[in-house]
Amino acid sequence: MSDYGIESLWGIYSAVAVIALLVIEFFVRPPTKRSYTQLFTQVLIIICLGIAASGLYREVPQVELPIPVYVDLSASVDEGVGTQLIEKLNAFRDAGIDLTLFPFGGEVSSAGVVSSESYAALRRGWGRVDQGNTDLGRAIQRAVAGGEPALFTTDGWPTQGAIDAPLQAATGQGVKIYPLVLDNSVSIKGAFRIVQLSSPLVAPAQKSVDIRVAIENTTDQPQTGILKVLHDSKVVLEKRIDVAARQEQLQIATSDPAAEGIKEITATLTPIERGFTPSSETVFLSGEEREKVLLVSGDAQDARYLAELLQDQRYKLTSIIVGDNQQSLPDLKSFSAVVFNNVARSQLSGSTPNTIEQYVKEGGGFIMIGGNRSFGLGGYIDSAIERILPVQMVPPQTMKKRLNVAVQLVIDKSRSMSFDDKLEYAKEAARETVRNLKDDDYVGVIGFDAAPFSVFPIERLATGRDRALSRIGQLFATGKTYLLPALDEARRGLMKVDAGRKHMIVLTDGQLPDAGPVYLSLIKELRMLGITVSTIMLGGESDIEFLKSLAELGGGAFYQTLDARNLPRIFLSDIRVSSGERTLQEDQEYAVRAGPDGVRSVTVQGMPPLRGYVQTKPRNGADLELVVLGNDKAEPLLASWMVGEGRSLAFTSDANGRWSNYWVRWPRFQTFWSEALDSVRPKDAQSENIRFDLRTAVEHGALLLDLAVYDPRAAGTAQVALTSPDGTTRTVALQQSSPGRFIAKIDRATAGTYRAQFKVGQFALTPVAWRLSGELFGERRGNGFNQPLLERIASETGAMLNPTPADLRALKRDRTQRESLSFWLAVLAAAALLINVLLREGVVRIGTMGRR
């Protein structure tokens, strides 16, 4: 609710006097010359102006503002101490106290931080406050300007500015300042802390380097603590250490070899004995980035094995599924090799073949893997892709070839299938399947409810067609739905028969109560065995997504219908087997043998047989490394050659388990593809990882850079893109002082984190980062809290050290904002004046009352 008030009464007194004179005039002058309406407007004008002159206002309640907290980020505050102070602030937040943090050092941030960031994160993000100095007076001035009580987390050791005048201003304006200190900051003679943390600037790709932590104990007693070292977010060392009196100890950790790019290494020592605060140090390590490999697959089924196998190699894999749309590829310049995995020409943008050709000629590596959408079957004949491949593509022919098929029908016969003749239509669908398959095909029928029921064990239709048609009628609905045992029974049946293709169709109308990872494991096993799985949902129950995932993982299709009459059509559509073109060879097995030129791209031997491949012809000048034995002749499987500065490799079978089902179970499958990739990657792929060393120093406030390059290829001018702690980036030229050595001087250096990208000649060196300690600019650690100064600040401003949540709640009071109403009163007076003028001039006529 709003309250109203006035600042003074003189305006109202004046208005009353004027109104009194006006009334007297009304009765003294002849009444015919004055209307009552005019009198009313004149009185209204005088009242509005009188109240406006008196300063009428309204007080509106305001939302309580967060308490400001000034957080000292200067280098004299150890990171472990800062972390504990942030924890104290978080305890206030947990108690319902709203806080806004204002980082400061030599400068004070004008922008507040609302989120509860860690102390290390604040230091990383607020280098622009000059962490090499502490201007406590400037922070107090900022608190006074805010006019609100404030918390301070600082060690109380200023290096610049003065605090007397700001402190007097805070006292004069009633701004209370509450410093926070650690409760266990008792004075102990000596120190137990980390004195140095070091590592190389750069770590080679996928290799570890040593991280060295020096701990000193300058007390007269042995000390114990917990040392923890993190590389980025990974703990690389955590142990209890004991350091003898007046001794130093060196601990060595190893970096995380998987970390790439510039990452922080932080070491924290937490003493066991009360009285010592934790100490912490941070350095930066730049992990050389792995080479990048691009895997382009025609669909998710093609990618599932290779993407997983190649993910954790010494190169970094980017996997793309192109799908049905014409998709453009990313910029290939950053990739060492590109792999086309059963990708059709129609799935790629029009310029892609020419782009790939140019990429390989300039030194890139390229692999094409076969499948039903690759080589000649994929539309690459006479394209730029064919020109760079070590095999010649064979045009697709119209002759068809059909493999025999083994099909297991796994049909839900639970109680719910008895409704709406669903089971009857499922039986008819099974009969149609039996009628339409060929004599050399196999069929088995399994019904399932709470347990599997083998209606017709899998058998060749040449001998069992009539029995199958008869026994399908034995299916009747009863019991609950439990699919898993039926799938396992179907698997065993398919494993017993010798067929070119093996397939399951699973039909259900209900929810699977045991749906979960065990199904996915079984489906993966089926795919490894060369068995595909399709699923059919009859109705709209809640396991649709699960059945979809089974079909996708099983390499089959998912169908859903609400009408059981559609089942015969769905069954026949799913099992209809059309052969591929003659260039797509599928049969029982093809033996793999070494080619006439010997195996050069891989070292593995004893390759398993394959169940299919795409026909091609070897090119003159190419290395025919592996062949498949089929059609009474040997045809290319693995071939390679050089194209300009790059290398191209063709593998005419697939890597998705359709033809390579024996390969995906082969223990050396991963080794084969890793070595194949290595064979096409540029031999100087690591050429830009130039070895170098960088030394930094601060002299008279300037940053000195001393760069030594240990590679004769990196010659010419040198420059650096240098990002300072305040976030600004500038390019600085370095002067060559001797062969392979370059120096630069940057004025007005400040404490904090620097990032640098050096370039020497045409080579960009690995980006690096380092931190200039505030101790180089006057800050000193290890002095604890300047308690006398902090107590003085609290005392003179009427506050205290370490307030409780209750103390801070007591600072909150009702706050209102005063809104003046004089403007609106003046507007009303102006409106009344306008009406009065219009009446007087006769523009507006309102009935008047006069005496005659």
Image (cartoon, rainbow, N blue to C red):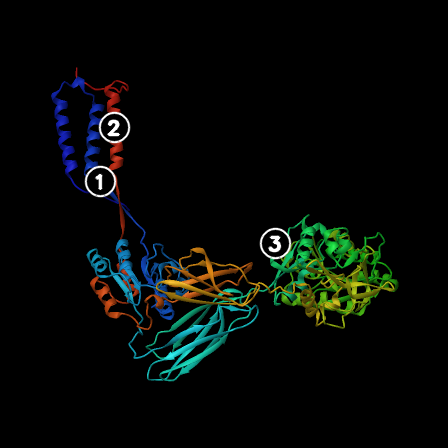
Q: Position of residue 248 (x, y in %)?
A: 39, 81
Q: Position of residue 662 (x, y in %)?
A: 75, 68
Numbered marks: total? 3
Q: Position of residue 826 (x, y in %)?
A: 24, 33
- The amino acid type, in three-letter code, at marker 2 is Ala
Q: Nearer the viewer, residue 515 or 93?
A: 93
- Disc number placed over residue 233 in the picture, else none: none
Q: Is residue 273 above or below residue 739?
A: below
Tell me which numbered mark, 2 or 3, is placed earlier along the sequence. 3
Looking at this view, name the residue that lies furthest to the front: 738
- Disc number placed over residue 331 in the picture, else none: 3
- From the viewer's perspective, is 163 left or right of 552? left
- Disc number placed over residue 832 in the picture, else none: 2
Within the image, what quadrant is residue 148 found in?
bottom left
Q: CA distance from mark 2 to mark 3?
A: 74 Å
**Residue plotted at (19% across, 29% down):** 43
- The amino acid type, in three-letter code, at marker 1 is Leu
Secondary structure under badge 3? loop
Q: Nearer the viewer, residue 491 or 421?
A: 491
Secondary structure under badge 2? helix
Q: CA distance from mark 1 to mark 3?
A: 69 Å
Q: Which residue is mark 1?
A: 56
